[in-house]
């Protein structure tokens, strides 16, 4: 026992004291409040980032949609001008229509085929990480 009391005296003499229960409770309350504030701040930051990202996404989609509408208008105008030009040089209107539609079908098939090839290449590059050899 003598040894334990001597050991306890050394700790108190070195400037260390054991905290009281009220001090521990107060410090714990302060710590919990600090973590609550930290979590609230992070949630607010995530909410702000989400709001900004959604606005950016909406603006980007609106610009893409507007660009598609403009491209469609230009494409239709080009088809009308091509058909009108073919009719003006003496081609029958039905033959002109079939020729313009055929050119459009060939173009669409080419774009779809190229898109599928590029998609497959991208997919194989993305999944090549998971190949087990």
Image: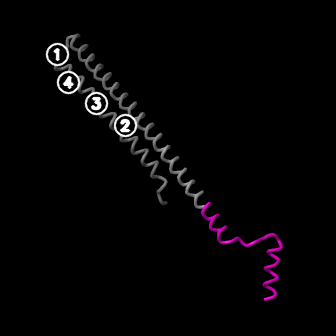
Q: Earlier in the sequence, mark 4 or mark 1?
A: 1
Residue placed at 27% from the left, 21% from the top? 79
Q: Earlier in the sequence, mark 4 or mark 2?
A: 4
The residue that label 4 is drawn on is 98
For the residues labelled 4 and 1, the Cα–Cα distance comes to: 10 Å
The residue that label 1 is drawn on is 92
Residue placed at 65% from the left, 69% from the top? 22
Tell me the SS state at disc 3.
Answer: helix
Q: Is residue 74 left or right of residue 11?
A: left
Circles 2, 1 touching at the beta carbon (< 8 Å): no
Residue placed at 80% from the left, 75% from the top? 11
**Location of residue 115 in the rendering, given as x and y in whole percent from the top left corner:** 37, 38
For the residues labelled 3 and 2, the Cα–Cα distance comes to: 12 Å
Magenta span of residues: 1-30
Was residue 63 drawn as part of the magenta stretch in this picture?
no
Majority secondary structure in the magenta region: helix
Colour theme: one colour
Tell me the SS state at disc 4.
Answer: helix
Picture disc at residue 74: none
Q: Is residue 94 left or right of residue 120?
A: left
| Camera-nearest residue between 82 and 71 | 71
Q: Earlier in the sequence, mark 3 or mark 2?
A: 3
């Amino acid at each position: 026992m003598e040894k334990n009391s001597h050991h306890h005296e050394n700790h108190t003499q070195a400037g260390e004291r054991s905290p009281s229960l009220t001090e521990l409770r107060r410090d714990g309350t302060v710590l919990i409040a600090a973590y609550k504030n930290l979590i609230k701040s992070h949630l607010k930051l995530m909410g702000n980032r989400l709001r900004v990202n959604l606005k950016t996404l909406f603006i980007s989609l609106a610009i893409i949609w507007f660009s598609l509408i403009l491209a469609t208008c230009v494409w239709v105008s080009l088809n009308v001008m091509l058909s009108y030009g073919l009719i003006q040089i003496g081609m029958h209107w039905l033959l002109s229509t079939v020729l313009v539609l055929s050119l459009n079908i060939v173009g669409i098939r080419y774009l779809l085929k190229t898109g599928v090839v590029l998609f497959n290449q991208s997919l194989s590059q993305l999944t090549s990480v998971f190949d087990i050899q």
